Amino acid sequence: MSADSLPTVLALDTATAVCAVALARGERVVELAETVGQRHSERLLPMVDALLREQRVTLADCAAIAFGAGPGSFTGLRVACAVAQGLGWATERPVAPVGNLAAIAWNARAVAPQAERVAVAIDARMNEAYYAVFDVRGAAPVELAAPALVAAADLAAALAPWAPDALAGEGVAVFASQLDALAAPLRLPQLRASAGTIARRAQQSVAEGRSVAPALAAPLYVRDQVALTIGQRAARRAAAG
C-alpha cells in the first residue's frame, strides 16, 4: 500500500493509565501521551484538540476515528469507545476498533522481524492474564488465538499448543515465573500498544473497508464480570496462595 493511498486516521487509546492520541497521515504518525491514572475522560478531548491544532488538521480531514478496543481497563475502554463514537457521529466518519493485543503484535513485527508466531500477554489483574496469538509473517498480524482470559498459573499451558517463537507484552515480565517452562527464544516484555500503532493499524483497516458505523463500535472487554463479590475475591486469594 503506497503512502498516497493511506487514509488520515485519528486514534485514541485509554486502555491503561496512559491517555494517548495519535494522528496518522500517509506514513507519518504523531502521538501525544500522558499518564493520567483515572482521568481519561477529563484529558482525552483536550489532547485531541491539542494534537489537531498542532498538526493543523480538522476532524473533517480524517477518514476515520480509531480507538484501542482492549482488552484493558474497563473504564478506560468505555471512555475511548464513547469518544470515538461521538466524534464519528459528529463528523459522519466511521470508527475503527483496534485490539490492543494486536497492536502489540504489530510492534513485535517491527522490532523482531525474524519472529513468525507471537504470543502476546498482558496483566489482567486478580492474578490473571489476557493473551492472544498472532502469525506475524505477512503485511499485518493474523489472529490465530482470539483474546482470552486465563489464570496466571495456566498461562504457559494455554500458549504451549501454539508453539510461539516470541512472547510480547508486559505479561512476559509480570508472569515471568509462570512462563519459565514455555519454550520461546524471544521475549519482548517492553512492548506496549500505543495510539500511534493503533493509528497505523487502523489505516490499513480503513483502506480495506473494515471500519464500522459509530453505533456498531464496541470495546473488547474479554472479562465478562467487572466486579467480584467479597466471597469471590477471597476464593481467588486462596487459590493464588
Image (spheres, rainbow, N blue to C red):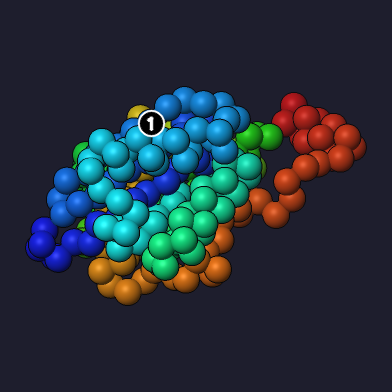
Residue situated furthest bottom in the rendering: 209
Which of 107/131 is in front? 107
Measured from the top left, where is residue 24 in percent x and y? 24, 49
State which quadrant residue 236 falls in: top right
- The C terminus sits in image quarter: top right
Residue annotated with mark 1: 33
Q: Residue at x 35, y 61 (%)?
A: 64
Badge 1 amino acid: Ala
Measured from the top left, where is residue 68 in percent x and y? 45, 49
Mark 1: secondary structure: strand
Which of 199/147 is in front? 199
State which quadrant residue 104 falls in: top left
Position of residue 168 relative to residue 119, above or below, is above
Q: Is 54 left, or right, of 160 in this rendering?
A: left
Which of 46/10 is in front? 46
Residue 117 visible in the shown view: no
Count of labels shown? 1
Q: Residue at x 26, y 63 (%)?
A: 204
